[in-house]
Image (cartoon, rainbow, N blue to C red):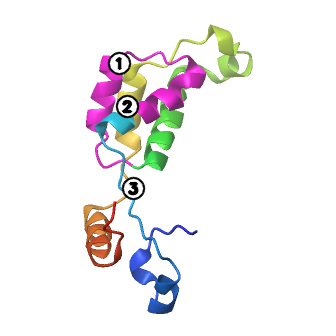
Amino acid sequence: MGATNRPQELDDAALRRFSKRIYISLPDYETRITLLEKLMRKQNNPLSRRELGQLAAQTEGYSGSDLTNLAKDAALGPIREMEIEQVKHCNPNRMRPINVDDFKQSLKRIRKSVADSTLQQYYDWNQQFGDISL
């Protein structure tokens, strides 16, 4: 078993050793909602299903790692509003919950990390070498 984000760089000898070659695409809309829900569980999931849907729509093309980075950045939203002294002495249970505006601000900083041209390379490689039995 192996994984790579550069399948097109595998030589023929290495490629032959993998009898199943499965392309895992970026998360779709519903999967992005599910991932965001799971990422927000530690925060008691303060976002509504509608807000999660809005975020999922705005994060098309984001990888699971991109969504994780987005959630981590959004979690810093309440802390960013505090003065340094407040942060030093803050009780985490008394902080305001993360909200959709924190995510909107994070979307300005956290962008998708996979270029459309790279996705096309993955698609092309999968058409040529991927498992077609799925």
What SS does tag 1 mark? helix
Which portion, as a residue range, is magenta? 34-62
Circle 1 residues within 10 Å: few <14, some 14–19, many ≥20 = few
What SS does tag 2 mark? helix
Say which amino acid is labelled 2.
Ile
What is the magenta segment's predominant secondary structure? helix
Say which amino acid is labelled 1.
Arg
Instruction: Name the mark on residue 49.
Output: 1
Determine which residue is flagged by label 3.
Answer: 113
Circle 2 residues within 10 Å: few <14, some 14–19, many ≥20 = many
Camera-nearest residue between 59 and 107: 59
Q: Is 98 on the left-hand or right-hand side of 94?
A: left
Is residue 40 highlighted in magenta?
yes
Determine which residue is flagged by label 2.
Answer: 33
Q: Are marks 1 and 2 in contact (CB under 8 Å)?
A: yes
Residue 17 point in image, percent of width and height = 53, 82
Q: CA distance from mark 3 to mark 1?
A: 25 Å
Instruction: Say whether disc 1 or disc 2 marks the residue closer to the N-terminus.
Output: 2
Q: CA distance from mark 1 to mark 2?
A: 8 Å
